[in-house]
Image (spheres, rainbow, N blue to C red):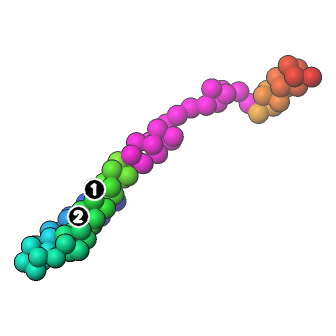
Amino acid sequence: MLAFILIFVVALVAWSLHLMEQAVEHKEFSLMLAGTLVASAAAAMLVVYFLMGDCISYLTTAHSPYSSYSSQKLVDTYLTNYQ
């Protein structure tokens, strides 16, 4: 999955550089803005990928404090303590 995302990000960066080169040649601000937005989208995509990777790995390895209890034991504890 990482390889696909890296290829996509590299393509976005190449496209943004192409847009910026066209902007310099034609002296158009809108193409420069478009290139900047595409480059920032590529950077944001990498940031989100790495943040979500850390988040997902944390959630899959985190253990509940009640993981050693059976569900019946939890129900019994609740009923004895809160009634």
Give above or below for 2 relative to 71.
below
Determine the residue positioned at 27% across, 59% down: 40
Q: Position of residue 19 (x, y in %)?
A: 17, 74
Report the mark closest to the observer, 2 or 1: 2
Is 62 left, or right, of 36 in this rendering?
right
- Kindly tell me whether residue 79 is visible in this rendering: yes
Indicate which disc, 2 or 1, sits on the residue closer to the N terminus: 2
Q: Which mark is residue 36?
A: 2
Label 2: state its secondary structure.
helix
- Front in this rendered view, residue 11 or 26: 26
Give above or below for 30 relative to 47.
below
Is 79 left, or right, of 63 in this rendering?
right
Give above or below for 67 relative to 19.
above
Q: Which mark is residue 43?
A: 1
Q: Please state which amino acid type lies under the numbered disc 1.
A: Ala
Q: Residue furthest left?
A: 25
Label 1: state its secondary structure.
helix
The N terminus, quarter of image: bottom left
